Amino acid sequence: MTKSNEGSTRRLLELCGCYFLFYVIYSLATKYLTGPAAQGLPAVDQLEYLIFSTIGGSLICLLVILFFRWGKMESARYVHWGKFRFPGEFLYIVPSGICTAIVIPTTTLLYTLLRSVMVAMLIMRGSVIVISRLVDAIQIQTGILRKKVYREEDLAVVFAVMAVCVQLFFVKSQGGRDLFHNPAAMIVLGSYLLGYFIRIYIMNYYKNTRGSCAKQNNKAFFAVEQVSASLTILLVLLVIMLLPALKGGLLHHLQQCYLAPGRHWPGEILAGTAYGFVAFFSVFIFMFKGRTATFAGLANRLTSLVAGTTATLLFAVFFQGRFPRIEDWLSLVFIFIAVAFMTRAETKRAAELKKENSDCPAA
């Protein structure tokens, strides 16, 4: 990352560029490791891959946090609990980490419960865009957010959702399993949506209560959130491993993935490190200074959609996979229209932020 100014358009483009790069790497690794054996690919179990890639992602996040000591956070209000003293922000960042720990396994379960991975992916991407807009509406109404959502941002939301719906329509017409006829998947999706809603709300609460001139330490937020998430996942994993499971059931399958993984598990962990870097840039985009949750959510999800199409194209060229279909290209058209509206919104927001910064006292 270069020495670009915090909250600048250049910094935003850098974050999106890094997010795009590592998302493409992770997507290519996923397609390669889970590809069909008939094409000479490893064909690892999908649940096993998601489990070990999550381990790899969590490890790289924790290593970076510990090595660079990102956990230090300045606060105007410290809380005393016995002999311990910690920033008051921890009281809501730790719950955000617990919600992250909910999002990770529910993502895995939704991929497993739905016959079509693409359907699950599109539903989750589209829901985050809608959730981000909803968070803005609530925080504007309660006075937490003192900015308005530009008309261009709302139009970008419309075209982004259209991009998701185009692909979802084609996938369902090709035999994707109907989500609404799967009670277990509906419960998992509900948990995913609730966890993501609370997490995005907390991210924007932290961002919007800093004040335009106050320091916003996204690295410290990320560190506390990820440590909380990792501890929660570890605790849940220990419980899962101790629970009795019926042979052939999902719980038994999950336990066997940990106890007797396939021979490609080191490669799955390595692939997960790319996902760990995706997590860094994903959070930093969600929490980007001076932007609404609507704009940040769009920047995050649209970048992942473009990266997904790029990975599909590269995999087709180098590993004889399928080329992007007509729905992929049509979806991409809607994405670029959404990006055009976001560009106009960003021009306005950058000018707004420049004025705010000029009113701040010199450090």
Image (cartoon, rainbow, N blue to C red):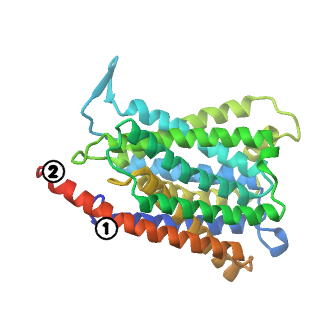
Q: Position of residue 167 (x, y in %)?
A: 69, 65
Q: Position of residue 321 (x, y in %)?
A: 74, 76
Taking the spot 27% from the left edge, 35% from the top edge, the residue there is 75
* Near-viewer residue (23 or 117): 117
Q: Position of residue 290 (x, y in %)?
A: 32, 53
Q: Residue furthest front?
A: 151
Gap in Å between the C-alphas at discs 2 and 1? Answer: 24 Å
Q: Which mark is residue 360?
A: 2
- Report if residue 315 is visible in the image: yes
Q: Which mark is residue 2?
A: 1
Number of other residues with Cα within 10 Å of mark 1, as a class: few under 14, some 14 to 19, many 20 or more: few
In the image, 330: left or right of 295? right
Residue 49 location, quadrant = bottom right
Q: Residue furthest bottom?
A: 317
- Closer to the chain start, of discs 2 and 1, is 1
Q: Mark 2 belongs to which amino acid?
A: Cys
Q: Mark 1 belongs to which amino acid?
A: Thr
Residue 245 location, quadrant = top right
Taking the spot 31% from the left edge, 39% from the top edge, the residue there is 209
Q: Quadrant of the N terminus?
A: bottom left
